[in-house]
Amino acid sequence: MSDLNRLLPLFTIIALNIGINSLYKNTIPCRTKNICKSADFYVSATAIPDTICPGMSSQLMASPTGGILPITYLWSPETGLDDPTSQNPVASPVSTTTYTVIATDISLQVAIDSVEVFVKEPPQAPGPISGPNSVCHDSTETYSIAEVYDCTSYSWTIPEGDTILNGQNTTQVEIKWSGQPGPVSVIAGNECGNSNPSVLIVTIEQIPEIIGTIEGPDSVCVNEKTGFYIPESPGATNYIWTVPDDALINSGQGTDSIDVTWGASAGDIVVTAENLCGQSEPVGKSILLEEGPDSAGMIIGRDTVCLNHANYFYSIPPVPDAISYQWDLPEGAIITDGKETNIITVFFSQDATSGMIHVSGVNRCGNGDESTKKIIANPCTSISEYQNQNIFYIYPNPADNEINIFMPGNKQYYEIIITDITGRIQYFEEGNNINEFDVKKINISKLFRGIYFICFKGSNEFTICKLIKK
C-alpha cells in the first residue's frame, strides 16, 4: 500500500477532528511549519545522529506533548526504516532523507513533525596532481592538488626510497627523489571514508654517462675534413664537443656525430653528454697530425736523350711518408714502367721536346716538394750514339747497409768489383745475360766506414764509381 493510501483515512479523521475541536473545544488548526498540533497536543521529531555515513543508522524519536494516551505513530517514507509504526524507529537511508511522523491520540487529535537525516558521502577524488613528471635523481620537487570539498584529511604515497619532506595531510607536499621512480598518489578523506586516488607517474632522470670511445681517425692531414662520433648515451639530450683552436666543427654540434675541418696542429677532441640533470664525465681522443711527404731527392738519370729511343731510367731516393710518386715529363716523353714509383722507365718519342722532369712524393695529405732535372732531347744518327748512353748508377750514396746498382742492359757478361782505397777487393760478382735495365742489391753492412770504389765491367765497357760507406 502506498503512503498516500495509508494516510488517506487518517487525514479524513484529522479533518473531522479539527472541525469538531474548532466548534466545541476551541482548539487551533494545524498551521505551524513542520508541526501540526491541537491546542494541547503536538509532537517533536528528532534524529540522533542527524548526520550519518553510508551504511550507518540513525535513531529517530517522536516526543509527544499533551494528547490522550494511547498515541499511535506513523513515519514516512518507509524506505530505510526498521518499523515505520514505532515511536522511535531506526533509520538507515542510503541518501539524505526527510522523515515525517504523524502522531494520533485516542481522541483522534493529530500532531505532525519532520526531521532530516543527512547521509554524508566520502569526498570526491582529488583533481590532477600538479608537479613535474620527470625529475633528476636527488632533486626536491613540489606537488599539489586543489582543495577537495568536504575533505578533512589528505594522504600522499610515493615510491620506495623517496621521501616526503613536508606537507603530508595537506594539499601540497615536497618530495626528495633519492629512491625509485613510480606513482605519486593522493587520496582525500573524511569521517565517512576515503576517495579514489589521483595519480601522477614520475620518472627519475640520471646524469647521462658516455659509454664507449670517440670513433674516428687517429691521425688527420692539415685542413682535412673528417668525421667523429660517440655511441648514443641513454638519457642525453645534448652533446658538447670541443676541438683544437685551429680546427672547425662544420656541423653536428649538439649531436653524437660531428664533421670537422682539421687545422695545422695535433690535439684532442673532447665530448660531454648532458641533460637537465647535469653533464657526464668528458671523453677525449688524441689526434695526431699527419703530414705530407718529405721533399723529393735528386733525380738520377741521363740529362741528354735520343729521340725515338726507349729504356731511359730515372729515379729518386725513396721519399719518407710517400705512398706513391707523381712524375711530370716534357712533351713527347712517355713513362713505360714504374709510373707511380720512385723509379721510372721512359720512352722519348720522335716528337719529344727538351724540358724539365718533375717528381714529388705523394700521400693522402698531398704532394711533397718536388725535384727537377733538365732534359735535352736530340735526334740520334746511329745505334752507337744511343748505346753510349748506357751508364752505371749507384744508390744510395753515401750508404749504410745496402746499395742498389742500376746496370745497363743488353749485356752478355758483367763483373761488379768493390775495392777499398788500397785496391784490395771487398766484393766480387759476375753474371751473364743482362736484359734491358737491371737493378742489383748488394749488402755492404760488413764494410768499415770509409771510401770504396765500385768497378762495373761489361762486354765492351768499363766504369768506376766512388762509394762512401757511412
Image (cartoon, helix red, strand yellow):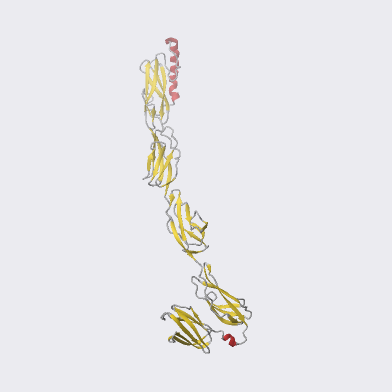
Q: Nearer the viewer, residue 422 or 326?
A: 422
Q: What residue sits 46% from the left and 56% below the top? A: 271
In this rendering, is residue 402 above or below 243?
below
Q: Position of residue 351 (x, y in %)?
A: 64, 79
Q: Position of residue 105 (x, y in %)?
A: 38, 17
* Quarter occupied by residue 371: bottom right
In this rendering, is residue 236 above or below 466?
above
In this rendering, is residue 21 above or below 442?
above
Quarter holding the N terminus is top left
Residue placed furthest toward the right: 351
Q: Position of residue 181 (x, y in %)?
A: 40, 47
Q: How many marks?
A: 0
Q: Nearer the viewer, residue 421 or 460?
A: 421
Can residue 329 be seen in the rendering of this structure? no
Quarter holding the C terminus is bottom left
Q: Position of residue 97 (x, y in %)?
A: 42, 27
Can residue 3 be seen in the rendering of this structure? yes
Q: What residue sits 42% from the left and 50% below the top? A: 207
Q: Nearer the viewer, residue 404 or 431?
A: 404
In this rendering, is residue 245 above or below 374?
above
* Quarter occupied by residue 149: top left
